[in-house]
Image: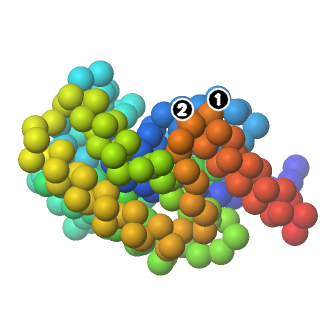
Amino acid sequence: MGETKRGLLIVLSGPSGVGKGTVRKILFKDTSLNLAYSISMTTRAPRKKEKDGKDYFFVSKEEFENKIKNNELLEHAFFVGNYYGTPREYVERLRNEGKNVFLEIEVEGARQVLDKCKGDDVISIFLLPPSLEELERRIRGRKSEPEEIIQERLEKARREINLKGRYQYAVMNDNVGRAARDIARIIRNRLNKLKQK
Ligand code: 5GP
């Protein structure tokens, strides 16, 4: 029997509110892409409808800082008052099983991952909003955060968008179906390229 080929690492960034989660949900319906979602750890409080162990692992600041100390995170960042990070072991296990592991993370964490993981088996994509006005409308539409947090997220979004050049691909999310198809095409092209090697 042939050896299982190690899966890709797919990094999707983009400002908060751009619709990364919605695009991801469409993308994951395409089972031929063999994707697995990396569930992040965060110290942020769960939003309504968010479930521990599905959307995030919700942990205390102390637990998170222990994970950092024990080098259990592939990357981590502090974002608008909270820690976010990617558990390393889970990602490694899935990739070794041949899954293409999908990381939905902000720019600082992405920088750490892209510094450490180089090569054809890493794909980095930045998802862009059609405009900042549209982004603001989407963030406000969540109705989950106070005004000062919304302002911080918007300010952060402006800074993040300036860093899109660090990514191999930039995809505009003016239509979620189209954005998901664009990303599916990028992944499929890379898988085909690797198959020919
Ligand atoms: P939110 O609070 O809106 O769920 O997430 C805030 C930001 O943190 C988003 O840009 C989201 O993609 C990012 N994020 C989620 N998980 C991680 C993670 O594990 N690491 C990093 N660096 N960012 C993350």
The x and y percentages for residue 194 are 81, 63
Question: Which residue is rendered at x = 31% and y = 61% of the image?
Answer: 158
Which disc, if any, is residue 25? 2
150 above or below 78?
above
Disc 2 marks a residue whose amino acid type is Lys
Quarter of the image with the C terminus in it: bottom right
The x and y percentages for residue 150 are 18, 45
When asked about the image quadrant of residue 31, the answer is top right
Label 1: which secondary element: loop
Q: Is residue 172 left or right of residue 149?
A: right
The x and y percentages for residue 170 are 57, 60
Which disc, if any, is residue 29? 1
Question: Between residues 40 and 163, which one lies in front from this camera angle?
Answer: 163
The x and y percentages for residue 185 are 74, 49
Crowding at label 1, few (<14), some or many (≥20) Cα neighbours within 10 Å?
few
Question: Which residue is rendered at x = 31% and y = 27% of the image?
Answer: 51
Q: Tags 2 and 1 in contact by the CB under 8 Å rule?
A: yes
Whether residue 67 is visible to the viewer of this picture, yes or no, is: no
Whether residue 162 is visible to the viewer of this picture, yes or no, is: yes
Crowding at label 2, few (<14), some or many (≥20) Cα neighbours within 10 Å?
few
Question: Which residue is rendered at x = 41% and y = 45% of the image?
Answer: 18
Which disc, if any, is residue 19? none
Question: Which residue is rendered at x = 65% and y = 74% of the image?
Answer: 119
35 above or below 46?
below
Label 2: which secondary element: helix
Question: Between residues 190 and 145, which one lies in front from this camera angle?
Answer: 145
Q: Is residue 190 left or right of residue 147?
A: right
When asked about the image quadrant of residue 192, the answer is bottom right
Disc 1 marks a residue whose amino acid type is Lys
The residues tagged by marks 2 and 1 sit, at their Cα atoms, a distance apart of: 7 Å
